[in-house]
Image (cartoon, grey):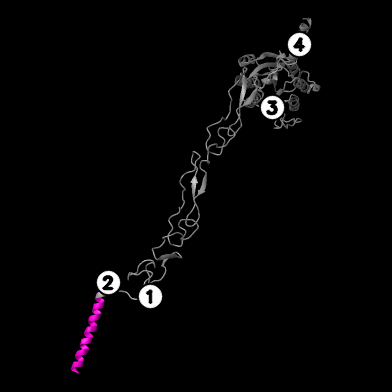
Amino acid sequence: MQKRGFFFIFSLAMVFGVCSLIPLNAHGEDDCYTSQGLIILDKSSSMTNIGASGDSLWEEAVAAIDFMTVNFENAIDFGLMVFPYPNECSPGQVVVDMAPNNSSTIQAELQDPPPESGNWTPMAQSIEAAADYQPLHVSHRPSFVLLITDGWQYCSPYDAATRFLPVGAVEDLYAMGIPVYIVGFTQSVDVLTLNRMADGGGTAHVGCDIDSEDPNNPENCYFQANDYAGLTAVLEQIALEVVHDRPCGTNEGECQEGVQTCRNGVWSDCVDEVGPTEEICDGLDNNCNGITDEGCDCIEGETRPCGTNEGECMEGVQVCDQDGVWSENCEGAIEPVEEICDGLDNNCNGLIDDGENLCDPGWECINGECVPTGDPNEDVDDDEEDELGYGADAPASCGCRTLSGGTTPALHLLALLGLLGLVSLFRRRDKRSGRLS
């Protein structure tokens, strides 16, 4: 019993030991975790300067942030840090924790503008403070930081040696797995430092110029915005990049994948998807099953030759109808006809004037014309009786013809009697002549 108990405890310990190796936050591709991001907004006194719209830079930035948080609050849990906090060169502080649907809370916190003087730009210290914000470090949540600034790393008195301190702070945050998006607002920013920060934060544009110092350089690594419209467009672009989404649908055939976004822990409908449709005969895979025009003999509007060009015939065309079936009619074709004696191949079989009964009896088709055939004195076959009543065995001495209509034995007798009468008449005349003499 003791051995069994020991074995049970040992087995249970092994199970718990193996289970402890599985991360508690392990999740599959189907798990939906809303992205979360901390906005770090520059509240230095220079943000009170008037922008291109006639409003202050602060008012333009607040309006752009409102646009982003309202439109993406179901897909991104936003939080807010402002710097300096509360003033001068103190590090920034989180004033709104990251949470879903909190755009109104963020807007309420941004209603108080910075003072016209006395607030500086402690970017490095604020980024370091963000690294200590524990909600960013939930391993199964896609997290990011978004920095918006209009100036340089600056505290009074200015120390040039501090210029690139924000670069190291961003690199440390990115090493923790948290990318940092850098937005320079207006052309008064430290372009070189922002380029290096974007590169260190893992968000630099592909192929960018990290050594650029020109805010108008399109190859800068960070996001540059000069007015409200530009800032709004940049923030929307960043939001679209950071939302937790996944492809949906298929790219098979005429279909195109769409995108599902994780919103409040639930996958959204498939957006921008081109789904399957009923298969039609058009040379495309409409139902996206990997087969094109199944069940179709042809594609609608397609044509093919039909008939023949042999002899007097001429090919036509068949047209494929909307059901993918070839038409029964051979349009434009000249079809075969009955053969006649004209020197042509009327029935289109490759032979000219072939066949029987092309001409009347006793005539033959030669070179496209009907001409008489055989002895011109004979108009009957040898096996048929001639007009004298003889057939092929008629006597050779019989070379004359009787009256039309043929002969009979009675006619022969009459002819013989007439001949005898003539002979008798001549003899009587001779006797009379002898007596008279």
Residue 245 in picture, x, y percent from top left = 64, 23
Q: Mark 4 points at which residue?
A: 11
- Which of the pair 303/420 is nearer the observer? 420
Q: Is residue 10 visible?
A: yes
* Cα distance in 3D space between marks 3 and 4: 57 Å
Q: Which amino acid does label 4 sit on?
A: Ser
- Neighbor class of circle 1 (other Cα within 10 Å; few <14, some 14-19, many 20+) is few
Residue 100 in picture, x, y percent from top left = 63, 15
* Cα distance in 3D space between marks 3 and 1: 128 Å
Q: Which of the labelled discs sits on residue 396, or is there none?
A: 1
Q: What residue type is labelled 1?
A: Ala
Residue furthest to the bottom in view is 437
Question: Which residue is depicted at the point 78% across and 22% down?
Answer: 168
Quarter of the image for residue 380 reads: bottom left
Numbered marks: total: 4
* Residue depth check, mark 2 versus mark 3: number of the one nearer the observer: 2
Q: Earlier in the sequence, mark 2 or mark 4?
A: 4
Q: Which of the labelled discs sits on residue 115, or is there none?
A: none
Q: Is 74 rendered above or below residue 211? A: above
Q: What residue type is labelled 3?
A: Phe
Q: Is residue 435 magenta?
A: yes
Report the span colored magenta: 414-437
Q: Is residue 89 visible?
A: no
Q: Mark 3 points at which residue?
A: 223
Q: Mark 2 points at which residue?
A: 409
Q: Does the magenta stretch include residue 406?
A: no
Assign the magenta stretch its main secondary structure.
Answer: helix
Element type at mark 3: strand
